[in-house]
Image: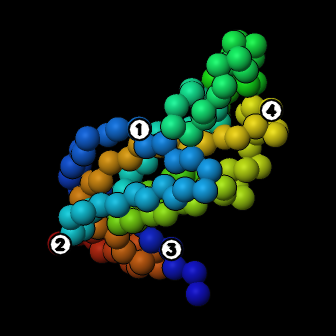
Amino acid sequence: MLRLYACKLLIAHLDNRQLLETCQLETMEGRCHWRNEVIVMTSARWGRMKTGRCLDIHPNALAALGHDPLFLGCSENVLSIMDRKCSGRASCDVRIPDPILDEIKPCYPDQTRYLETSYTCVKGLCVNVSLVGYINSLSTQPN
């Protein structure tokens, strides 16, 4: 059975939002550590943004191809996808490779891509979506 939830954010609790790099064969693990907090994705990019932990490019290849925008520096904003996967949940795991992200090819198709994300945890209240209309009608009725 599919359960849908609607979350009302009450008070923002901003964490240190740092960029998380998730390489191939790794899992992006989003976690909120306090009770009644949910994840809100703040950024998500898929591609080959820069060399580093996820992209170890030989210096000769980098010298020859580093200025090619489809080889390095190519990415696509995937915040809407990561929102659907993670926002509104207390925890979230996205394994790379991911079939939905793999359909997006901002770089040469045969090149290794990675996920770069950031999120924050906010205090929130989640209720079953079937109750939302009922709750909203209660809040609009006069006393």
Q: Determine whether the residue tagged by mark 1 lies in a helix, strand or loop.
A: loop
Q: Determine whether the residue tagged by mark 2 lies in a helix, strand or loop.
A: loop
Tell me the residue that label 4 is attached to.
Answer: 108
Picture layout, residue 91 above or below residue 22 = below
Q: How many marks?
A: 4
Residue 137 visible within the image: no
Q: Tell me the amino acid under the disc marked 4.
A: Tyr
56 with respect to 63 (left or right):
left
Tell me the residue that label 1 is attached to.
Answer: 19
Q: Tell me the amino acid under the disc marked 3.
A: Leu
For residue 34, the mark is: none
| Image x and y of residue 89, in percent | 40, 65
Task: Give the residue at x 43% y 59%.
Answer: 29
13 with respect to 44 (left or right):
left
Tell me the residue that label 2 is attached to.
Answer: 143
Q: Tell me the amino acid under the disc marked 1.
A: Leu
Extreme residue in the right direction: 109
Q: Viewer-nearest of labels 3 and 4?
A: 4
Sort mark 1 into few (<14), some (14-19) or many (20+) by Cα contacts within 10 Å: some
